[in-house]
Every structure is written in C-alpha cells, then in structure tokens.
Image (cartoon, rainbow, N blue to C red):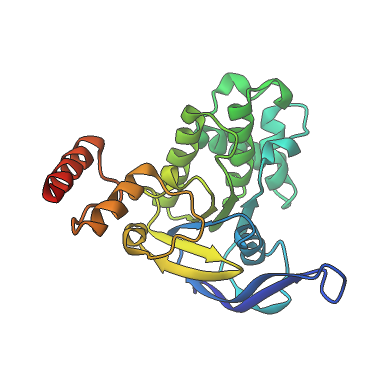
Amino acid sequence: MPLVANGVGHVYRRGEPGEAHALDGIDLTISGGEFTLVGGAGGSGKSTLLHCLSGLLRPTKGTVRIDGPAALSIQFPERALFADTVLDDIAFGPLNTGLEKGEARTRALEAAGKVGLDAGLLSRLPRTLSHGQRRLAALAGVIAMRPRYLFLDEPTAGLDMAAKERVVETLVRLNREGTAVIVASHDLAHFMDACSRMLVMSRGKVVFDDRPDGLVSLDDTMGLALPPSLIVARWLRTRGIEAPWNIGPSEAAAHIRRAHEGLD
C-alpha cells in the first residue's frame, strides 16, 4: 500500500487568538519509489504537509496511512548534531530503535558512504566540519534509519553549489534504490531534473500535481521562484514556440532570436 492522505487539514492554535489554517483538504497518494518535489511560496503549507505526512504532526482533520517506516529531515538539521564524533551522531537514530551497537555502527558507516562523507571525518567533532559536511552528516543520520519514505524540508538551504549538487545526487541514488523521496524546497532548479512528480501548494491546498515539465503551461505560478530556463520556456510558449522547461542557453538563444525575427 502506498502513502495515502485523505482530506488532511491542519490548524495551528485552533480555537485560540491567531488561529492559522495551514492545510485544507489534502488528498494525495505517493507510491514507494517516487521522487516528489513540493514547491510553493512561503507560508503555502509545504513544511506542515511534510510534518503531517511523516507522522511528526497529527493533522487536525483527515487521515494519513503509510505502509513503511518514514524519516523526516527538518530545515537546517545540522544544528541538531550533538555527539562526540560524527559517526556516533549518525548511529544515534539506529541505536534508539533498539539495534545493537555493532549493527548501528555498520548502518552509520554505510550511510556515511552513501552521502560521500570521507572516512577521515567520522572520528571528528561534528562542529569542526564545514557547513556542507555537517548537512551531509545530518542527512546520513536520517538515511541510517533506512526509511521507506524520506521527507526533507529545504535540504539545500544555505549550501554552496557543490554541496547542493552532492545532496541532490545522494537523494537521486537513494530513490533509485527504492526509497520514496519527498522534498519541500524553494530551490526548484536543483530538484526539477531529479523528481518524477511536482506538487505546487498555495494557501494550504495542492493546486498543481503533475510532472515538473507541466509548469511550462501553468497559467499562475503562485509565487514560485522559477528556474531561469523555465521562465524562458514559458515566455517562448507565449510566442507559440514549444520548448522544454530545462532548455539550454544556446537552444534558448536560437529560439529567442527567431521569435524576435518573427516580430520584425
């Protein structure tokens, strides 16, 4: 059975001053092995959706059914690193599920390898790592739990280009191995090539659910920070020229030149 959400809604401070409706009537089915990107402007409900789907937050309305273990990586997870060594931090989650120390260590080493952490870093204090390395260590800690569904909230926030690419490569590899990956992010450019499905949220509702290339024909982008290539593809479409969302610079330049020549 896949992950199924039926009529999920959530209200913060329900019945109190400042009551806020974060989710409203969410119906979703996410199959194991899907790579889903959740986009939307700030305050659209992305983080709350991930918290409800992963079980961290109980929705005030509706139900979520999931057929396997889930793990959630919150925003800036490296701030939660606390152990004496990086390896101990990665092994903390598996240890707390009741695994023997040796098995937890094996999982931690395996997860560290998957995210590309050098073995020489594993004996160091987490705070001595670079920002990007700490983010990878935090991701390894989630991977070590071997979730069937992996939820990540803004996993590339604050990272440089190289670290962002490493995170995306790691998630793509995990997805190919069978883990369902669900990412909420403003950083669409780094994830649209990787994902097989795109959700766009606005005011607590899912207003778009399709392949990422479907954004080319979306009339209202609802505050999304679109990748430059997608902006160009959408502009070309208004000129009657069909182009993929990830159109390259040289191809885009040729199309734009022809479009301008057609206006002369």
In this rendering, position of residue 169 left or right of residue 133: left
The vertical placement of 229 against 200, above or below, is above
Percent position of residue 99, x then y:
70, 48
The vertical placement of 112 against 246, above or below, is above
Q: Which of 71 and 220 is in front in this view?
A: 220
- Residue with the most extreme front position: 264
Q: Which of 114 and 242 is in front in this view?
A: 242
Residue at point 60%, 68% (across, down): 203
Percent position of residue 238, x then y:
26, 58
Percent position of residue 243, x then y:
22, 52
**Residue 106 appears in which quarter of the rendering?**
top right
The vertical placement of 46 against 9, above or below, is above
Q: Which of 101 and 71 is in front in this view?
A: 71
In this rendering, position of residue 129 left or right of residue 184: right
Residue at point 40%, 53% (across, down): 195
Does any portion of residue 2 appear in the rendered image? no
Q: Nearer the viewer, residue 6 or 114?
A: 6
Residue at point 65%, 36% (across, down): 105
In this rendering, position of residue 118 left or right of residue 93: left
Percent position of residue 221, x then y:
44, 60
Does any portion of residue 202 appear in the rendered image? yes
